[in-house]
Image (spheres, rainbow, N blue to C red):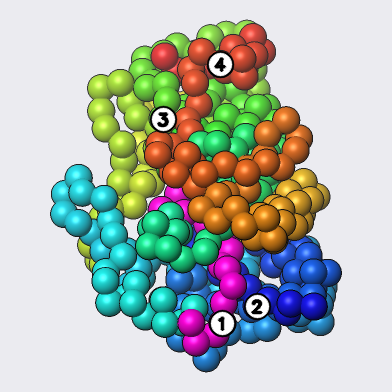
Amino acid sequence: MDRKRIGILTSGGDCPGLNAVLRAASRAAENLGWELIGFHDGFEGLLAPDEFTVLDRKATSGIMHLGGTMIGTVNRGQFVKRGGARQPSFIPAEILGKTRQTFQNLGLHALIVVGGDGSLNTALQLHKAGLPVVGVPKTIDNDLEATAMTFGFDSAVECVASSLDRLHTTASSHKRVMVLEVMGRHAGWIALHGGLAGGADIILIPEIPFDFEKITQEILRRDRVGAKCTMVVVAEGATPKSGRQSRHHTASGENRLGGIGEIVGREIGERTGKEVRTCVLGHLQRGGAPTMLDRILGTTFGVKAVQLIAEGKFGSMVSFNNYETHDVPIAQAVHKPRRVDPNSQIVKMARAVEIVFGD
Ligand code: F6P
């Protein structure tokens, strides 16, 4: 039998379900008589070709329920060079040359890249440079085009909803307004689904700019009808109609989303005179065990990625639509982010159960 060697790497922010992908890809590869090796720390591992881990059945046994990724990840590194303001990033020629060398030295038949939009963009560039690559979509934000769902999202939603359950009991005991800031970058999926599942009263998402006055009126209305508390979920990318996204400037020069929860909480307190508490859920949404759905999605995606290699469908990505896996060109997944449509059924349904978006 032709014993092929294929590689896999996990890149960008980690998320629950990555280990399920590794385990499934390992088994699918072994069933074809192939060897799977895992490069460490995302694309960087391609530059340290002696340090890979052989992902055989033994190495990947008992990992499906673990959060994170057993082979590590990074979300910045030598594969991304900024081409200047508004210019797409690119892989420097020297790094591309070293990657080609790694493929040759290791006799690599193909590479599976498990990542979000940035990492899939890098995968696309490798493919365009002639390297045999397939993609597996990953992000808690669920903001990738060409797939209805990514693994990691359900675990993040579960974290938001169960946190709301906890916050609810303390908020109603004290008759407070509770503001919960959640992740999601420029998309409101986590806030919308987590808020719906956790019984939020107000959900603020980037796709629907909000008005502080509308939020104030809703809280005062709820007071008048005897509501014990008001639960507000704010996506980190949510934007007031009269303002801009809130960002933290870090010492390393990064410009990270965050801080809108505190702003919303302060405004509500000042405008309503009510007691308000704010909670930022942060990386709790990315950590811990994957939900059952994410274990199944991760497993399905891992198997499909190996199948795509067997079929020679390089430059394609696993996608999930109508409860089935398919393949799409990676280019289709990264051309623009998938965001919540303010006129979609789910937003209308949320409004029908009296959720207020502050617009
Ligand atoms: O893309 C996933 C995500 O968790 C976003 O929701 C969030 O804005 C970002 O990554 C946080 O990144 P980091 O782990 O680098 O702080």
Residue receiving disc 2: 5
Q: Residue at x 47, y 39 (%)?
A: 332
Looking at the rendered structure, the kind of residue marked 4 is Ser
Determine crowd level at label 4: few under 14, some 14-19, many 20+ residues with C-alpha closer than 10 A: few
Looking at the rendered structure, the kind of residue marked 3 is Pro
Q: Is residue 259 above or below residue 343?
A: below
Whole-percent x and y of residue 58? 81, 82
Query: Contact (CB < 8 A) between labels 1 and 2?
Result: yes
Asked if ligand 1 lies within 8 A of label 2, the reply is: no
**Can residue 358 be seen in the rendering of this structure?**
yes
Query: Contact (CB < 8 A) between labels 3 and 2?
Result: no
Q: Is residue 110 magenta?
A: yes
Q: Secondary structure at mark 1?
A: loop
Looking at the rendered structure, the kind of residue marked 2 is Arg
Q: Is residue 175 magenta?
A: no
Q: Secondary structure at mark 4?
A: loop
Judging depth in this view, the residue of 223 and 263 nearest the camera is 263
Name the N-terminal-most of marks 4 and 2: 2
Q: Residue at x 31, y 65 (%)?
A: 91
Q: Is residue 328 above or below residue 7?
A: above
Residue receiving disc 3: 206
Query: Contact (CB < 8 A) between labels 4 and 2?
Result: no
Whole-percent x and y of residue 166? 69, 42
Q: Is residue 53 above or below residue 349?
A: below
The segment highlighted magenta reads: 104-122
Number of the front mark, 3 or 4: 4
Q: Secondary structure at mark 3?
A: loop
**Mark number, residue 344:** 4
Name the N-terminal-most of marks 3 and 4: 3
**Can residue 271 be seen in the rendering of this structure?**
no
